[in-house]
Amino acid sequence: MSSDPQAPSSFMMLCASLGTQVHMALGLIEDPIEKKAVVELPTAQQGIEMLAMLETKTKGNLDEAEEKLLGDLLTQLRLIYVEVAKNEESAE
């Protein structure tokens, strides 16, 4: 890990940014363009896959806080994805 004091927060900001995009794709945050919540499951799935790739590629290189943040975020997003997908399926 870099001795740069900004490195951990930069990684955490990256995770938070990707997480926010997934939350938006899951319809949990209003789309600023549409001015309403829009569910886009393929986009949400892609964001979750990117975070999972980050988890795999950075394994052993994160500090404890970074590892916990990423793991918790992925768990949360995966659970929400399943719930939203079920709701979308039953709404059809």
Image (tube, grey):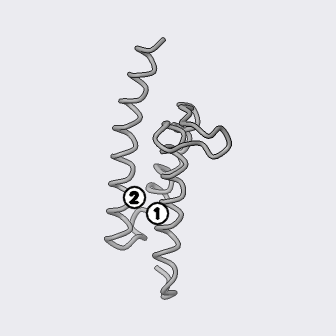
Residues 53 and 66: in front is 66
Indicate the amino acid at tag 1.
Thr
User: Disc 1, disc 2: CB below 8 Å?
Assistant: yes
Number of marks in picture: 2
Which comes sooner in the sequence, label 1 or label 2?
Answer: 1
Q: Position of residue 49 (x, y in %)?
A: 51, 43
Q: Is residue 4 above or below residue 80?
A: below
Q: Residue at x 49, y 58 (%)?
A: 57
Indicate the amino acid at tag 2.
Leu
For residue 56, what is the image quadrant? bottom left
Query: Which of pointers 1 and 2 indicates the residue nearer the eye?
Result: 2
Q: Residue at x 31, y 71 (%)?
A: 64
Tell me, for residue 70, which label it has, or none: 2
Q: Is residue 42 above or below residue 59?
A: above
Label 1, label 2: how many angstroms apart (C-alpha)? 10 Å
Q: Which residue is mark 1?
A: 58
Q: In the displayed image of the protein, which residue is found farthest to the top?
A: 92
Q: Is residue 22 left or right of residue 76?
A: right
Tell me, for residue 88, which label it has, or none: none
The secondary structure type at the circle numbered 2 is helix
Residues 6 and 89: in front is 89
Q: Position of residue 66 (x, y in %)?
A: 38, 68
Q: Position of residue 70 (x, y in %)?
A: 39, 58
